[in-house]
Amino acid sequence: MSDKIEKIKCLIIGSGPAGYTAAIYAARADMKPVMYTGMQMGGQLTTTTEVDNFPGYPNGTDGTAMMEDLKNQAERFGTEVRFGMVTKVDFSKEVGGIHKVIVDEEKEIEAETVIISTGATAKYLGLESEQRLIGGGVSACATCDGFFYKGQDVVVVGAGDTAAEEATYLANICKQVTILVRKDYMRASKAMQHRVNKTENITVLYNTEIDEVLGDNVVEGVRAVNNQTQDKIDIPVTGVFIAIGHKPNTDIFKEVLDMDDTGYLITEGKSTKTNVPGVFAAGDVQDKEYRQAVTAAGTGCMAALDAERYIGALE
């Protein structure tokens, strides 16, 4: 481990809309933020080919290009963006305390404030054909990408409230929605199941899983298998929405920060404050309800303002 300890005013862990927006605000407040991007610079949005619902892009944009725009804007105001992974944290529980962070298991940093924007990772089935077609018709966000399948047939995979919500959302814009449920029942709440059952253009197939996503460069259908009879059917669709949950990227904060039973960081009231003074959380790492780029950006702004006010109160 390096003997030299770097001291900074504002450390941002993770990139994406939340991290970059926090960086823009923190830099403009002369907090001289340093950002460590994590292994996926730009976060989940870099796996989205088209972004049509972020304000300010009347003709839409590419997810990777949008993240590059945000990065350039953050750097223009003085943010130092570094590629690296925070591997260990030692946060002070005292107001005004110094937070120690280890990057890539060797570089030690001491920060007055920390903004966590490590996001969440969508869970996928793990099929080769599914992974190959992410961005080509396979998505984990109906509200992000559903518009592109208007009037078309799609499949939703999942059995919980998220799958039911995504299916009913898609049913409003798509011709036909087929939900594939692995077991012989849905885990969704009764209210959500009633909504699904009352929607005419939604079909639910129980005991059914995806065997393969069909298509070379774009989705052309799915091959589904009944896990009781082993019978297979091909369902022609242009979109496949995986709705089996997300995993917040919070493993290194366990036993340090308060989180719910699924790992999302808990923030105080309408703020971005965690249970540790001077440590703030923004974006999907603390938001399991909306998970949109624009809401992540909003909480990134809030985190920078909270951090600025925290430091201001100490001075």
Image: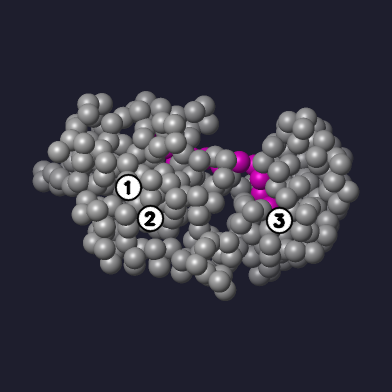
Decide: marks 1, 2 in contact (CB < 8 A)? yes
Q: Amino acid at mark 3?
A: Val
- Depth order, front residue of 273/219: 273
Find numbered disc 2 in the image and state the secondary structure of the residue it sits on.
Answer: helix
Determine whether 134 is above or below 310 in the image: below
Q: Residue at x 57, y 73 (%)?
A: 59
The kind of residue tagged 1 is Ala
Q: Quadrant of residue 53?
A: bottom right
Q: Would residue 276 be found to the left or right of residue 254 on screen?
A: left
Q: Position of residue 188 (x, y in %)?
A: 73, 33
Q: Is residue 257 magenta?
A: no
Residue tagged by mark 3? 240
**Residue assigned mark 1:** 304
Up the image or down, 257 lies above or below 196; here it is above
Q: Indicate which label's residue lies in the foreground, 3 or 1.
A: 1
Give the CA separation, mark 1 to mark 2: 8 Å
Instruction: Give the residue displayed 57% in from the left and 45% down from the top.
Output: 290
- Within-10-Å neighbours for mark 2: few <14, some 14–19, many 20+: many
Left or right, 165 with reference to 246: right
Q: Residue furthest left?
A: 4
* Closest to the observer, 104 or 26: 26
Q: Of the residues shown, which amino acid type is indicated by label 2?
A: Thr
